Amino acid sequence: MSEHVRQTEPFRWEGIAVKPYKAEGAHFAGITRQTLFEGGDGLACQLRYFEVAPRGWSSLERHQHAHAVMIVRGASRVLVGDRIVEARTHDLVRVPPRTWHQFQTAGDEPLGFLCMVDCERDVPERPDAAALALLRTDPAIAAFIRI
Ligand code: MN
């Protein structure tokens, strides 16, 4: 990767592909992924940019690795553990290990966020029936989650 990568238009960068969020599945909607930094040169983390269309959502999941997120476009409602937080542009969201999380767009604007993760990380786990039942004991979370 070169030392300088230009933005070509808002939230798009020279030579960086806009990819599907995940390979397959119906457990998310309206979301793309761009890997801005792949790690390497002693950096053990990646920086990705995700963009979620209005009314879109990321998969409801948890894993051992953590996420460090900055919202850079629009607004989000985010499930983090047992909380639903309202996150606006330039807010920070931390997802600790083994914590259920889901990002949803709030409002009519696309949601864009930067997400830092370890290069070496475990595969996300999606909730089974028992985990879903537990999540749904909170009415606010029951109304929020998309699966
Ligand atoms: Mn995740």
Image (cartoon, grey):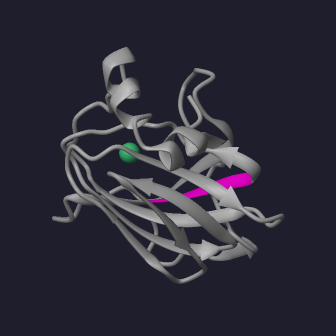
Q: Quadrant of residue 116?
A: bottom left
| In the image: residue 136, left or right of residue 34 | left
Q: Residue furthest bottom?
A: 90
Q: Position of residue 111 (x, y in %)?
A: 67, 63
Q: Which residues are magenta?
A: 48-53
Question: Does the stretch in magenta take in 11?
Answer: no
Query: Considering the image in quadrants, where does the N terminus appear?
Result: bottom left
- Please report the residue visible at 19 percent of the width from the left and 59 percent of the height from the top: 44
| In the image: residue 11, left or right of residue 94 | right
Residue 3 in view, yes or no: yes
Above or below, 82 against 69 in this view is: above
Q: Position of residue 54 (x, y in %)?
A: 78, 54
Task: Report the magenta stretch's main SS.
Answer: strand
Above or below, 7 against 69 in this view is: below
- Please report the residue visible at 54 percent of the width from the left and 73 percent of the height from the top: 87
The quadrant where ligand 1 appears is: top left
Q: Position of residue 140 (x, y in %)?
A: 52, 49
